[in-house]
């Protein structure tokens, strides 16, 4: 979100990636990084389309992808909202794979277990935002 409370999404029409996927990926990133929080309302389709100068149908398609991926829901007459993240067996398995990859890479780089745990704790507590406040 920028200082006016709007979600900022930048698309690259010449990237070869469909615009609706770029929009969905940008929103997924905003959710993953905490820019968008559980239960928060996404901008209206028309507002988002106007902001990024694209067709409202393209934004609607991106929102449908987010719904299909289990990241958003439509509340009739109100709008589209970020779903609360739920712990599911599929999500746990995905995370185990990510952790396994992280540990393997850390070992290759010679990073200690204590440092890995410290980095994870920092990220869980706001990561870069906390580091920038200390500077």
Image: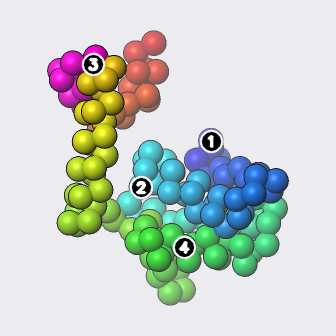
Neighbours of disc 3 within 10 Å: few (<14), some (14-19), many (20+)? few
Most prominent secondary structure in the magenta stretch? helix
Relative to 10, 66 lies left or right: left
Image position of 28 with respect to 108: above or below: below
Q: From the image, tell me which residue sits under label 3.
A: 111
Q: Which secondary structure, mark 4? A: helix
Precedes in sequence: disc 3 or disc 4: 4
Q: Which residue is mark 2?
A: 37
Of 55 and 135, the residue lying toward us: 55
Q: Residue at x 46, y 21 (%)?
A: 132
Cα–Cα gap, marks 3 and 2 = 31 Å
Q: Under tag 2, what secondary structure?
A: loop
Where does residue 95 sit, x and y in percent of width and height? 27, 51
* Residue corresponding to mark 1: 3
Would you identify the image quadrant in which residue 51 lies? bottom right
**Is the residue 43 above or below the residue 122 in the image?**
below
Residue at the extreme top:
135
Query: Which label belongs to residue 65?
Result: 4
**Spatial separation of the CA atoms under disc 2 and disc 4:** 18 Å
Magenta segment boundaries in residue numbering: 110-121
């Amino acid at each position: 979100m920028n200082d006016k409370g709007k979600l900022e999404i930048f698309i690259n029409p010449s990237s070869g990636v469909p615009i609706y996927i770029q929009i969905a990926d940008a929103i997924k990133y905003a959710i993953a990084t905490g820019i968008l929080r559980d239960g928060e309302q996404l901008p209206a389709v028309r507002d988002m389309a106007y902001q990024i100068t694209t067709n409202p149908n393209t934004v609607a398609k991106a929102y449908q992808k987010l719904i299909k991926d289990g990241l958003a829901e439509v509340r009739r007459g109100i709008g589209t909202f970020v779903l609360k993240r739920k712990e599911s067996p599929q999500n746990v398995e995905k995370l185990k794979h990510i952790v396994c990859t992280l540990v393997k890479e850390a070992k290759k780089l010679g990073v200690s277990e204590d440092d890995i745990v410290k980095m994870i704790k920092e990220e869980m507590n706001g990561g870069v935002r906390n580091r920038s406040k200390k500077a």
